[in-house]
Amino acid sequence: QLQASGGGLVQAGESLRLSCATSGFTLNYYGIGWFRQVPRKEREGISCISVSEGSTSYADSMKGRFTISRNNAKNTVYLQMNSLKPEDTAVYYCAAVRGTVIPDRCVRGDYDMDYWGKGTQVTVSS
């Protein structure tokens, strides 16, 4: 299982760090993606990271503001979100797919992810 945490209510311009932790399996062999969704909209890819942390990708609107990283020893992936905007308000999910991952394709939603975590709500007030 995956569990996303770290969401909350912040003001525009502030930061949050989301965590994605696993139970029951090790992250070492999985590429990880962060996605978000708001009501009545399609799920949106935010960022993905390859197994070895050698490659990452971001959606255009997140470049320069969000940073994805992983600590395989702690079985955790992080999403540092800076300069948050009201339009970043959403439920954020992490997901895992085993094997070689091309982060650009992951952000586009091309992969059938093996595991999805329960989301964490991020609310950014103006």
Image (spheres, rainbow, N blue to C red):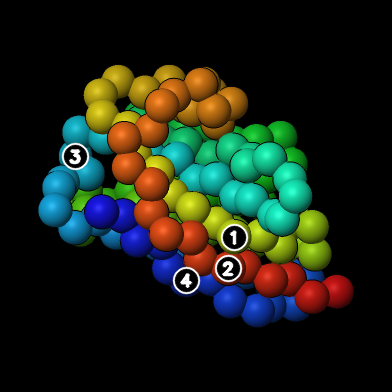
Could you give the CA–CA distance between mark 4 and mark 1, rounded to whole angstroms?
11 Å
Element type at mark 3: helix
Q: Which of marks 4 and 1 is in front?
A: 1
Q: Closer to the camera, 103 or 69?
A: 103
Three-letter code, disc 4: Gly
Q: Nearer the viewer, mark 1 or mark 3?
A: 1
Picture layout, residue 27 above or below residue 112: below
Three-letter code, disc 1: Val
Could you give the CA–CA distance between mark 1 and mark 3, rounded to whole angstroms?
25 Å
Q: Name the residue under label 3.
A: 28
Picture layout, residue 102 above or below residue 79: above
* Quarter location, residue 30: top left
For residue 6, the mark is: 4
Residue at the image point whose x is 53% and y is 71% from the top: 7
User: Along the polypeptide, which appears first: circle 1 or circle 3?
Assistant: 3
Picture layout, residue 87 above or below residue 56: below
Q: Name the residue under label 1.
A: 91
Counting from the top left corner in percent of width and height, residue 47 is at: 53, 40
User: Along the polypeptide, which appears first: circle 4 or circle 3?
Assistant: 4
Residue at the image point whose x is 54% and y is 28% from the top: 109
Question: Cβ–Cβ below 8 Å for labels 1 and 2?
Answer: yes
Q: For label 1, count other residues whose C-alpha is less than 10 Å away and answer few (under 14), some (14-19) or many (20+).
A: some
Could you give the CA–CA distance between mark 1 and mark 2, rounded to whole angstroms?
4 Å
User: Along the polypeptide, which appears first: circle 1 or circle 2?
Assistant: 1
Q: Closer to the camera, 113 or 16?
A: 113
Q: Is any atom of residue 76 visible in this view?
A: no
In the rendered image, the residue lying farthest to the right is 126
